[in-house]
Image (tube, rainbow, N blue to C red):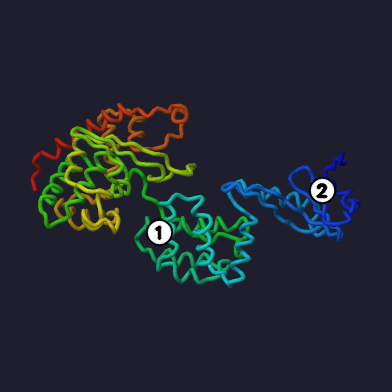
């Protein structure tokens, strides 16, 4: 029976037996091991498992006595925290070596590595698409050429200034680049030692009580003017229906313009919209957004009756050519700004997302319970009630949206002075 190996102690390292060939590992009892080679070289090794992939790694930490037992243990504790946060220290070392071989050392190289390695594992598809847009567009082109370790807060500030008054875009760009530096810091990728983005204040977010929602009179006017535009075949006919569905269901504009026929179940009176997993915005803590079913009232089904075909409900080109995908929220915003707002007089400008907020506000006015309204919008309830109450409340959600849809149908028929 082999002799039991006792955990390492600093005083006994010098007296460890040297194997005649190969190597022998001596554990310290805390995940660290000292590998003693027949050549009398001693190397600290640490085995860990990559959190996201389950891959087992054996990482060299340094040689003894240059790295003592206490320092090796401290290094392991620091690396263990990084691994728990999703990092892969050994994988990052190998990536850095590959980048160095090809001469890559710029911020652009760092960003490309982040988007290729980290983003597909940790970010939702929508977030990846957004980050890629902000981290590769023309505004950041000059900054991507700077060595990653030499990027300064002043240069970050110059980049942020290029967004001008576009505060929302600037705020999202700020978050995207900060995420890259935060990812690079623990393992010093490309010798990055700080996050210069944090030294530049993030553009102030619009406060919740400043955010727009439409009153009943405003909704009546929007529905009426949208109806006039829809009757004119020379002007886009898809946008009024998309706006109405956002307003009637409370779903996100991006989800509505990406609606597919295969996810809809319709009949004469009502229907259901079944969004599959990962089709929606992923919230913090979710690897994949869960499926989400939305009741469709008769007023929504009536709007969908104008559209026929397969693929996307709102295709980009036409009902017969689906090759270019679907309409976007940008298309919807442009339609509101250029087509609808000029017909609304002095009404304050609104966005497609404001209609989601409007739906939630009016559900409250209809005395729909808060937990039902949250289920309709697909919000995650982090409270104790949300953790323990796993009910879907489908009948209650259907009844609430049917009442709201009936209100919208009535308001759309009312006469509003133009």
Is residue 245 something one can see in this rendering? yes
Task: Depth check: give the residue in front, 33 or 387.
Answer: 33
The answer to whether residue 334 is above or below residue 297 is: below
Residue 161: name its quadrant: bottom left
Residue 7: give x, y in percent of width and height.
Answer: 82, 43
For residue 279, side relative to residue 121 (left or right): left
Residue occupying the far front of the picture: 1
Residue 68: name its quadrant: bottom right
For residue 391, side relative to residue 26 (left or right): left
The answer to whether residue 197 is above or below residue 290 is: below
Residue 410: name its quadrant: top left
Q: Earlier in the sequence, mark 1 or mark 2?
A: 2
Q: Give me the residue at 13% from left, 51% from top.
A: 229
| Label 1, residues with CA under 10 Å away: few <14, some 14-19, many ≥20 | many
| Rendered image: mark on residue 170 | 1
Residue 413: give x, y in percent of width and height.
Answer: 11, 39
User: What residue is disc 2 on?
Assistant: 26
Residues under labels 1 and 2: Cα distance? Answer: 53 Å
Which quadrant of the figure contains the N terminus? Answer: top right
Q: Give me the residue at 87% from left, 51% from top.
A: 13
Q: Give me the residue at 35% from left, 59% from top.
A: 166
Task: Depth check: give the residue in front, 272 or 328.
Answer: 272
The answer to whether residue 121 is above or below residue 146 is: above
Label 2 SS:
strand
């Amino acid at each position: 029976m082999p002799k039991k190996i006792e955990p390492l102690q600093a005083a006994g390292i010098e007296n460890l037996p040297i194997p005649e060939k190969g190597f022998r590992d001596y554990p310290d009892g805390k995940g660290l091991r000292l590998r003693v080679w027949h050549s009398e070289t001693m190397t600290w090794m640490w085995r860990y498992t990559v959190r996201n992939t389950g891959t087992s790694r054996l990482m060299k930490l340094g040689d003894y006595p240059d790295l003592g037992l206490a320092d090796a243990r401290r290094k392991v504790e620091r690396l263990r925290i990084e691994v728990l946060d999703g990092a892969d220290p050994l994988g990052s070392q190998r990536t850095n070596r590959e980048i160095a071989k090809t001469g890559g050392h710029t911020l652009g190289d760092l960003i490309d590595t982040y988007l290729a390695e980290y983003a597909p594992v940790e970010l939702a598809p929508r977030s990846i698409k957004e980050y890629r847009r902000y981290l590769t567009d023309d505004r950041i082109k000059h900054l991507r050429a700077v060595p990653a370790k030499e990027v300064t807060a002043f240069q970050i500030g110059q980049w942020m200034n290029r967004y001008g008054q576009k505060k929302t875009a600037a705020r999202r760009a700020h978050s995207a680049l900060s995420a890259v530096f935060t990812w690079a810091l623990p393992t010093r990728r490309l010798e990055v030692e700080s996050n210069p983005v944090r030294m530049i204040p993030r553009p102030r977010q619009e406060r919740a009580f400043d955010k727009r929602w439409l009153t009943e009179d405003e909704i009546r006017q929007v529905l009426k003017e949208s109806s006039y535009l829809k009757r004119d075949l020379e002007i886009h006919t898809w946008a009024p229906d998309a706006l109405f569905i956002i307003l009637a269901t409370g779903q996100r504009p991006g989800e509505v313009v990406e609606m597919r026929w295969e996810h809809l179940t319709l009949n004469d009176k009502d229907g259901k919209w079944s969004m599959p997993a990962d089709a929606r915005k992923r919230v913090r803590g979710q690897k994949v957004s869960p499926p989400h079913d939305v009741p469709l009232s008769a007023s929504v089904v009536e709007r969908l009756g104008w559209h026929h075909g397969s693929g996307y409900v709102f295709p980009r080109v036409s009902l017969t050519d689906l090759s270019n995908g679907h309409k976007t929220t940008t298309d919807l915003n442009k339609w509101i700004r250029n087509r609808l707002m000029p017909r609304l007089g002095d009404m304050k400008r609104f966005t497609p997302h404001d209609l989601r907020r409007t739906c939630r506000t009016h559900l409250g006015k209809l005395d729909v319970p808060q937990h039902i309204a949250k289920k309709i919008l697909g919000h995650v309830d982090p409270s104790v009630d949300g953790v323990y109450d796993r009910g879907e409340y489908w009948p209650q959600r259907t009844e609430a949206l049917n009442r709201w849809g009936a209100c919208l149908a009535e308001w759309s028929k009312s006469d509003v002075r133009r």
